[in-house]
Amino acid sequence: MARLTGTWPVATRRWGCAAAFLLLLLTVQAAQKADFSGDSTAATINHSLTLLQRLQELLQNGNGSDSVLRVRSAASEEPKVFHTHQLLLSLQSEVFESLLRNQSVVTLYEPPETAALFEKFIRYLYCGGVSILLHQAIPMHQLASKYRVWGLQRGVAEYMRTHLASESSQGHVVGWYHYAVRVGDAALQESCLQFLAWNLSAVLGSAEWGSVSVELLLLLLERSDLVLHSELELYTAVEGWLGRRQPEAPVAERVLRAIRYPMIAPSQLFRLQAQSAVLARHRAALQDLLFQAFQFHAASPLHFAKYFDVNCSMFLPRNYLAPSWGSQWVITNPARDDRSTSFQTQLGPSSHDAGKRVTWNVLFSPRWLPVSLRPVYSDSVAGAIQPVRIEDGRPRLVITPAMSSPDFAGVTFQKTVLVGVRQQGRVLVKHAYSFHQSSDEAADFLVHADLQKRTSEYLIDNSLHLHIIIKPVYHSLIKVKK
């Protein structure tokens, strides 16, 4: 909250300056909106950039100033002084309009982070533009929110949503998520969560993993769309997080119980039991889950499903990048023609099916046309065919099993296609398309991508980078006994 000090201004000087600025602004707006009714001799003379330069000079030189802002912070004994103009501040901020209504000198108290950006903030009020860096996004958003400069607030929030992939030494997405929770920005929260989920492997090995809150960690562990190498990789990262954060036992056990132990091979589970200090410390709280995981690997999924409810997240794979779950496919010059490939995956994560494989065929078409757009003969002119443009087609990806087997009983396959893009020098997941066995393709696959352009954001060195993941989903064949 701002603390106010000051003296009464000279009314004539203040309102005289205000009237001059207002007349100037209205004149420019009227010139830009003039309607010349299609007169070919009409022309617009636009000196708006000159006006912005004049406004910036007003701030720098303090010419015609009728108000003073004194910004104090704990980082400096001397306040920063800004000679400003009430009209320009009031046009952008209702808070400044209220503060400057009856006084000309206002003292503001700001934390060091926002005080360091106050000059940029004031410059935005004069010129309508500002340049910020990753570490300046939160304090600038705080200033915009505090002084109710809604345009700047929306602009910084959009900057944050579009710069999640930017590389920084300490990471910033986790911090932005926590900030979004504090200020109640649901859109930014969801954007951060989605980015973290689709690029979790990159986050697990970064400095920001240790700053993840308990609440955020639990939200991530609940998700089945996490993209990472394996469930073991996730357990190892969680073990490191627990070692650094040392939460209370109930919190640690809640986190550990969110790991999907049936997705970890028995040999790896045995090793964890023998070597993991965290698992040994909380063995009593996890014993039922570990026992169930070994039972899952020992019996056939069909037999296991007769006695246990497999319709829960514990038996649902995440988006694992390990070769047994799918395959990467790099399509060079994807706009050229149709392509196809095939690969094999495991039938399921149960060790009972360790030797069973499923072969999958994949067809990619860059310009597939829906039936409604395909050429047809016209009734009006014999033999005439309606013209079809290349751009009318859309990319299509079809994934089908090359075989059928009695082993498929009780299991369906969810297909997930990850699309990798290069952002800020890093290859990251931009989209994830998921569809089930009842459908062989995603209806909206790359519907907004323009693969004809070599500069398309979906292409890396003129290649489309896909990673196809097959996730077996088990179903109970009979009602589980209560």
Image (cartoon, rainbow, N blue to C red):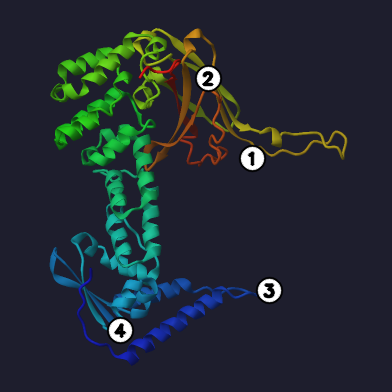
Q: Secondary structure at mark 2?
A: strand
Q: Are marks 1 and 2 in contact (CB under 8 Å)?
A: no
Residue located beneath label 2 in the image: 341
Q: Is residue 264 above or below residue 114?
A: above
- Whichever of labels 4 and 2 marks the residue nearer the N terminus, that label is 4
- Whichever of labels 4 and 1 marks the residue nearer the N terminus, that label is 4
Residue name at image x 31 percent, y 31 percent: 201
- Whichever of labels 3 and 1 marks the residue nearer the N terminus, that label is 3
The answer to whether residue 34 is visible is: yes
Q: Is residue 147 above or below residue 329?
A: below
> The residue under label 3 is which amino acid type?
Ser
- Whichever of labels 3 and 4 marks the residue nearer the N terminus, that label is 3
Q: Is residue 471 left or right of residue 38?
A: left
Q: Which mark is residue 37?
A: 3
Q: Is residue 244 left or right of residue 235?
A: left
In this view of the protein, which residue sits in the foreground, 90 or 365? 90
Quarter of the picture holding the N terminus: bottom left
Q: Which mark is residue 391?
A: 1
Cα–Cα span, label 3 and label 4: 42 Å
Cα–Cα span, label 3 and label 2: 59 Å
Q: Secondary structure at mark 3?
A: loop
Q: Secondary structure at mark 4?
A: loop
> The residue under label 4 is which amino acid type?
Asp
Residue located beneath label 4 in the image: 66
Q: Position of residue 46 (x, y in %)?
A: 52, 73
In this view of the protein, which residue sits in the foreground, 476 or 53? 476
Q: Is residue 106 above or below residue 163?
A: below
